[in-house]
Image (cartoon, coloured by chain):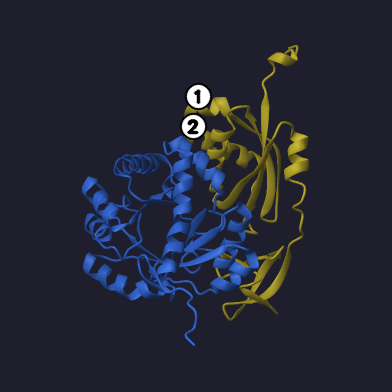
Chain colours: A blue, B yellow
Amino acid sequence: MYEAVRAHPEGQSTVARLAKLAADYGYEGVVVRNHSSARADYDAGGIADEYGIDVVRGVEIRADDPEQASGSVGNFRPSHTILALEGGTNALNRFAVEQAKVDVLAGPMAGGGDVNHVLVKAAVENGVRIEFDLSGVLRASGGRRVRAIQSLRKLEEIADYYDAPYVVSADPHSHLELRAPRELRALGEEVGLSSDFIEDGLAEWGRLAERNRCIDSESFIEPGVERGRYEEES
Amino acid sequence: MKHLPKHLQPRWRYLALELEGWPDAEIDRRAFQRECWYAGQNLLGDPGSAAADLTVVRFDFEDGIGSAIVRVRRGETEPARAAIACIDEIDGDAIGIRVRGISGTIRAGEENYLGRRRQESKERNVVFRNEERVAVVRDGSADVRLDDAFVGATDLDCSFA
């Protein structure tokens, strides 16, 4: 299972600190998903070796409109393993699910955003993962929390019907906001997402990272075609 | 009143919790108990929190690190775990919380899950992001004091002056 974290300078803990605690909590990896305007500076390989946890280089694009988002996708896609796009308006949600270069549509229900069957079908077609953000359940209270739970349930009903790909994250901004997988599973059960659903969503980050690394590797030519090891011609 | 015969006494489970905060966090038992009950009530509702109980029976918090044992009715441990995961700050201090384990007696919980952490923290001068700072260092982790807040880092991020 993987967790997607926001590191210093966007959050309050460095990638190393988050990775250290995540390894202790039983995660297999962390995805650094800082916004493109506040990218972290870290040595993924060194941290991975020190704490025995996979560190995935990711980025989350924040844009005002689809045109700006489109430019950023082109800029950041080659250098990052996981590319997420922050939704939250209908136009951006729609742009994200129709763009196969985007891996994850983050926070689609935040702000004034909404998701319907059309968007979810497009997400299935383009393989865009829809994010279930548990931060509203973990760290909000009162009416905001009620709305967060409502939107998670709505999203779950639609995503389940179309069998859409999804990821789950608690969106921690510091090592104190990190929660262990078991806690998140228990929380999922309370808000109407099954514990298997949560586990699968956390694991999906890892599968996504593995797939993208495979595509980025030099031996990859196109789906199903790879450069293998052949005997040298004498 | 005479205590209940043993077969009528409630079966308790004890959640052993590990707490963590910034080095300047000050949390007392009363505040932690209040947050536990609030979290239970907010997530599980009145019937759910009555069923879970969530009484703090042991509490210790010092220098930004601590542990606690919370009593839960048997069979309600997963809802209680979910409620406790939702505690994110106490009296304005951000707090990290984790269930280390569940046991049938307080003593077993303390011995099996809470024994190990008593590493002393030390204030050290470190260089973080090319600037000299003061950090509270413990067990490979370092909470670096910036001008108005802390940054969680490890010895990989800092060089010790």
Few, some or many C-alpha atoms within 10 Å of disc 1 (few <14, some 14-19, many ≥20)?
few
The residues bearing labels 2 and 1 have C-alpha atoms spaced at a distance of: 7 Å
| Marked residue chain, label 1 | B
Position of A212 with respect to A110 (left or right) is right
Residue farthest along the bottom direction in this orientation: A234
Q: Residue at x 74, y 16 (%)?
A: B6
- Discs 2, 1 touching: Cβ within 8 Å: yes
Q: Which residue is mark 1?
A: B47
Q: Quadrant of residue B59?
A: top right
Q: Is A150 left or right of B155, judged from the image as shown? A: left
Q: Chain of mark 2?
A: B
Instruction: Measuring from the top left, give residue A135's x and y in whole percent.
Output: 44, 50
Please determine whether, in this image, residue A193 is positioned above or below residue A168: above
SS type, badge 2: helix
Q: Residue A222 in the image: x percent, y percent? A: 34, 69
Where is residue A37? Give x, y as percent.
Answer: 38, 71
Kindly state the secondary structure of the residue where label 1 is placed: helix
Query: Which residue is nearer to you in this view: A31 or B63?
Result: A31
Residue A213 against residue A123 in the figure, above or below: below
Q: In the drawing, what numbered circle is on residue B44?
A: 2
Give me the residue at 50% from left, 24% from top.
Answer: B47
